[in-house]
Amino acid sequence: MLGEPEKLRTHTIGEAFTLGEGSGVVLAGWVERQRDLGSLVFFRLRDRWGSIQVRVDESEDAAAHTAAASLRAEYVVSVKGHIALRPPEERKDEPGGDREVIPERITVLAEAKTPPFYITDETPADDTMRMQYRYLDLRRPPMVRAMEIRHRVFLALRQYLDSRGFWEIETPMLTKSTPEGARDYLVPSRVHPGRFYALPQSPQLLKQVLMIAGVDRYFQLARCFRDEDLRADRQPEFTQLDLEASFITREELFDLGEGAMAHIFREAIGAEVKRPFPVMTYTESMSRYGSDKPDLRFGCEIHDFTTAFTGTGFRIFAQALEAGGEVKGIFIPGAKPSRKDEDELGAFVRARGGGGVAVLTVAGSEVGGGIKKFVTAGTLASMREACGCTGKGAFLLMVGEPKKVLPVLGELRVHAAARFGVPKRDGWHFCWIVEFPLYEPDEETGEPVPAHHAFTSPLPEDRERLESDPLSVRADSYDLVLNGQEMGSGSLRIFEPELQRRVLRNLGMSDEVIGDRFGFLLNAYEYGGPPHRGFALGLDRIVALMAGFSSIRDVIAFPKTTSAQCPLTGAPSPVDAEQLAELKLKPTDGGK
Ligand code: ASP
């Protein structure tokens, strides 16, 4: 009888780290760092779980030595041998650093060309090169870790949500436009020439339909497509945890969301998240942090200094105050900006549309900075009182209409805190921001556009102003913010067809257009739509933070460049005339 076929591998390298001295193994993986010292050859063998040293001594095994001497980086090999402990002085303080493999047979399974960059922890090449050779980039340990974290997050979400009664349901990729404020990716229909599917910007409308269907608790790890001019860290397709639940209050939804966060941080990276998360209204967040995504890892909150400067001889402030402006500012503890720093802060503020920044430094009774001569002891005392700030540091002040000043101060707060080394608290600092405006003015036309999306419910007490003063209407909406970055958002949905029509009419849509685009949804609500709310969380961003990457590109296996191309496959690519003809599309000159 034939024996068992010999295995290509008996253990992963991770498993080999735990085996006793002398254990027999067959390991398989990629060769790195081969060093040929003559009668001794060393190389490391790497797989997804780690890497281990292989030592080949010519005097012990001439055949294995010959094989080892011919190896080159990234060859795929199988190594049969046994585990030996390295002499104490050669041990490395890393997983498996106390051991090596002594081979009796090395088999080359595949050869490799010289890779265009080394497979090391540090970023080895520019982004386009990394994406073009993604299969090499993904062999790098930080990328392996990111993929693992991503997997653990997805798994943990599924477990958690299942335990809370949620069902995972897929909604179609070929669908009707689901507006989230971006352009759609369109797919032409061959069977219905001249008609198009849209790839979903989110599963928003269909998850609403699922609530009408009585599903009650739905989630999906949903791919979303948005054709936007890609700013710094956007991807045309990205993944959200999308969920929706019927008959629940905002507080119940927050409890669920916080539970999910705590669970994934524990499962994926062993971190504890402090709950409950603070809840702040949009208005409060703007006035305290000048931002709807406040970084709560440090203070330097915005304060009002209008009273302190009322009636002072500081002309620029006096004039602005007379014109109805207010003085807002932050105190950066420990900072002592130089003249040059002041210029730089001024340029920072002006680049964001601010008029300028007034700087006052204080150290005991000594004051300095650009506006020193306008600040009497009395003014300083009122300033300190206004913000409760004692000790050394710098006041950075702006004057004007709060709506304009606050966002700039918000950015200045983050910039100056980093610039002057304000310490940040460690860990994961979440908060919920609630009650955003329902609409915001369009940047070009000033007309209302949805601040979240058009299916978000206005707060009941603001509904009567929907037509008369739409921009003042607040929504039952919320964002989840983590360490100064927006992670996700959601809202109570409109479940009354007439209210939905009113909200859509404000966007300039006629009843006919509303019927065309959203008739199916409005109809569905005619058959008994429960109150429901939901949420979507950007999984790429959260995994990037967990894995310590600043770009979401690093935690997506096959991302696209900032110009929406895939350097690995060459997508998007031209199609031939026949394919276009089948779709009844006319070839163009490709925009040339
Ligand atoms: N559909 C929304 C989004 O993608 C999230 C939500 O309201 O659930 O941002």
Image (cartoon, grey):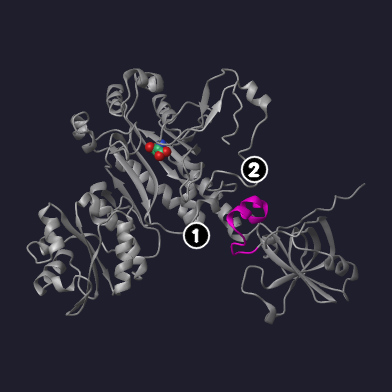
Q: Ligand 1 sits in which quadrant?
A: top left
Q: Can you tell which quarter of the image residue 588 is in?
A: top right
Given residues 375 and 516, the one toward you in this image is 375
The label shown at residue 298 is none
Question: Residue 393: x and y, percent?
Answer: 25, 73
Q: Can you tell which quarter of the image residue 41 is in?
A: bottom right
Q: Which residue is drawn at 24% across and 38% down?
A: 474
Identity of the amino acid at label 2?
Answer: Gly
Which residue ends up furthest to the right in the rendered image? 1
Q: Give the range drawn in magenta.
A: 120-137
Question: Residue 573: x and y, percent?
Answer: 63, 37
Q: Residue at x 30, y 36 (%)?
A: 445
Q: Is residue 388 magenta?
A: no
The label shown at residue 570 is 2
Q: Name the residue under label 1.
A: 548
Q: Does the magenta stretch include residue 134?
A: yes
Disc 2 is placed on an element classified as loop
